[in-house]
Amino acid sequence: MINIHEVLETNEMIEKENLDVRTITLGISLLGCVDRDVSRLCENIYERVTRTAENLVSTGNAIEREYGIPIVNKRISVTPAALVGASACRTTQDYVKIAMALDRAAKTTGVNFIGGYSALVPKGMTRSEDLLIRSIPEALAETEFVCSSVNLGSTKTGLNMDAVRLMGQVILDTAENTKDAGSIGCAKLVVFCNAPDDNPFMAGAFHGVTEADEVINVGVSGPGVMRKAMESVRGADFGTLCDKVKKTAFKITRVGQLVAREASKRLDIPFGIIDLSLAPTPAVGDSIADIFEEMGLERAGAPGTTAALALLNDQVKKGGVMASSYVGGLSGAFIPVSEDQGMIHAVQDGALTLEKLEAMTCVCSVGLDMIAVPGDTRASTISGIIADEMAIGMVNQKTTAVRLIPAIGKGVGDTVEFGGLLGYAPIMPVNQFDCSDFINRGGRIPAPIHSFKN
């Protein structure tokens, strides 16, 4: 039973510490939409999405009003478009038509984003997947709500370096195509190693082929709550600190579990997972970097930051699994730059570099996220950064991701503005030494030996 003290405590978290349900994401399978004619395929997709998600936003709004719990985003994820479009799409323009159909469906349903303009190419690319990847720059320039992701590797298959090389150029082209809006297209494009099938967070959400026809996944956030909780154990030993993180994560997850179950019941769609991720916002006090400082670091990036993040990530998961039997997605701690005011300040103060962020991704829940780099960065350099991050995921059997934004026309010392939840980002310097001969080898980096367990 929930007692009155817990009710008051939850109210305090919501009103003063930025606790929210970051997203209700409705996953929709599009496998039944397949058709050899592109126009019919697009209409099938539009009809399927709008019919299934017609009550998603209104239901989320009703739960928000009735329970007083902010639900920031209502989103849709769909089956990777490269699978759905394989029979019909013969050109990149055919795939752009699918992106526009998804965008039209997002506008009709009123959701914030729709994810799944995606390809899964960890071992090799089909002709269809190659076409979709090459269509991404135009698709993201022509749409407003569509998010795209590409899975480039896995622990069991290794890294598809042909796809890694291609994505370096695709990211640059996407930045160029959306340069008038701060290269924002790249904020809606992420590459993965070991991408999960049930991620509710954009830009990487897609509805995996292992999922049911429809499913409700919920993402919960609460960096502000976690930072506030740590004030009561300031100076205490690590065992006490870990207990506080676990107990706080438990309370945050219970809020998400309540919303998830209620949304599932009202929409008559199965509940999938709770993703308990400490996902920050640009709001003051809602920062992962502030948590590090409360733990005793002068700035995020100081010596000890990776250890602090490892502790935080693990204890958040341990607390979350006690509150819900179905914790999945990317649960843990995100370390984006542009979406986190404290991380932005750490970069501006010189405490946080790209290399330190890469080290931190060994123990965070995702990877290099929302990092702006100079617009004249070479495609091969972007591919090299991607390859490094994918290798971390492959060897450590974890999900890693890269969401880089080459800000066209901007250099180190400048900032790029995105607005809203995406905030703004300082342009970070990148290593200028060339890696093109390495990237241009092509082929595949083999999986590590522990992939032969089965």
Image: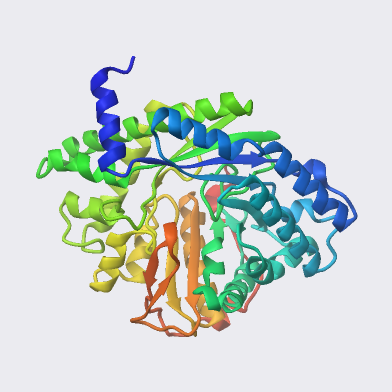
Q: How is the image coloured?
A: rainbow
Residue drawn 60% across and 37% down? 56
36 vs 16, left or right, is right
Residue at 45% over, 53% down: 366
Q: Is 102 placed above or below 58 here? A: below
- The residue lying toward the viewer, choosing from 448 and 358, is 358
Q: Is residue 83 left or right of residue 64?
A: right
Task: Determine if residue 423 is in view.
Answer: yes
What residue sits 62% from the left and 79% below the top? 440
Closest to the observer, 11 or 445 = 11
In what quadrant of the picture does the N terminus appear? Answer: top left
Residue 361 percent across, percent down from the top left:
39, 58
Q: Is residue 416 above or below residue 190?
A: below
Q: Residue at horizontal 17%, vertical 57%? A: 297
The C terminus, quarter of image: top right
Above-or-below relation of 121 to 13: below
Look at the image and tell me whether residue 126 can be seen.
no
Residue 197 locus on image (x, y percent): 60, 44
Furthest-left residue in this view: 235
Find residue 117 and report its horizontal and vertical position in percent: 67, 56
Outermost residue toward the top in this view: 1
**Residue 348: where, in percent of width, then height?**
27, 73
- Depth check: 440 or 238 in front? 238
